[in-house]
Image: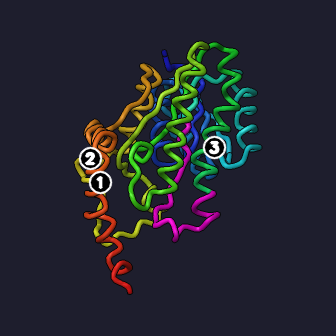
Amino acid sequence: MDIKGKVVIVTGASSGIGEATAREFGREGAKIVLAARRVDKLQSLAMDINSMGNGAETFVVQADLSKLEDIQMLVAQTLEKFGRIDVLVNNAGFGRLDWLENLDPIKDIQAQIDVNVMGVIQTTRQVLPVMIKQRAGSIINMCSMAGLIGTPTYTIYAASKHAVHGFSEALRREVKPWGIDVSLIYPGGVVTEFNQHAGIKRKTNASTPKFMLLTAEQVGSAVVKLVRRPRRMWIIPWLWSVTAFMNKFIPGFVDYTTITRFTIPEREDELNVK
């Protein structure tokens, strides 16, 4: 797909991967619809992209992706402004990481499902008739390695990303006859605001090795490449493919390693309480 002049919706565009992705599309001269709740950050981003001087154009829409009415408004305003939708990047999402019994039923559990799963489904549902009518389109769903591998404290986040994985796989097989591509991207650890809001508390200080950490810009660049040359799924960096392989074919080993090296050390005090 020649991206210049194409109409692209990027959800969760106010920071992190969404912001970086929007900038990458801006460099390609696309018409970018910036959607998120923090409109001040969107407006600042829009000014930066508009100043690139390569024909890039932006349109800011304040939207809460957990609300169907906001999603409907986002799509309606996009069509009113540009008349078509060529690319949808379902990026909006967040994580709350803790032991399941510690998660708040509404703020942590329900909210993650509402944004990470229902937001993706409902946004895609609103955009799909437009792309079917055009007989062309590209849908990029931001997944995570948590969509392939479930690890302790990631119960709800992993559940939401596994749901996105299954939804995208089924959708890809539904819409391909209309010339619509559905791609999944699975980043490992990324340097964004995610950790600041996730509430991570770890005694072991376990984290993604620095040499495997990605920047938001690297993920944004990968999204643009997926639009240009679609593929079913893309794990980045590629080394995580080894872990995904092990999780699929030797899950017992992964269980043992994770439990003995992470779960038990993290919960040692609780386990020793009689």
The residue indicated by pointer 2 is 212
The residue indicated by pointer 1 is 208
Q: Specify the quadrant that holds the C terminus.
A: bottom left
Amino acid type of disc 1? Thr
Q: Is residue 207 above or below residue 126?
A: below
Which residue is painted at 68% across and 46% down in the image?
63
Q: What is the C-alpha distance between the residues marked 2 and 1?
A: 7 Å
Region in magenta: 90-110
Amino acid type of disc 3? Gly
Q: Secondary structure at mark 3?
A: helix
In this orientation, which residue lies closer to the viewer: 190 or 242?
242
Bin the neighbour count of mark 3 within 10 Å (Cα to Cα): few under 14, some 14-19, many 20 and up.
many
Residue 50, image quadrant: top right
Amino acid type of disc 2? Met
Q: Position of residue 191 (x, y in %)?
A: 37, 51
Q: Secondary structure at mark 2?
A: helix
Per the rendering, the mark at residue 167 is: none
Which residue is painted at 37% across and 85% down in the image?
273
Q: What is the C-alpha distance between the residues marked 1 and 3?
A: 27 Å
Determine contact: label 2, label 1, CB under 8 Å: yes
The residue indicated by pointer 3 is 119
Which residue is painted at 33% across and 66% down in the image?
263
Q: What is the C-alpha distance between the residues marked 3 and 2?
A: 29 Å
Bin the neighbour count of mark 2 within 10 Å (Cα to Cα): few under 14, some 14-19, many 20 and up.
some
* 70 part of magenta stretch: no
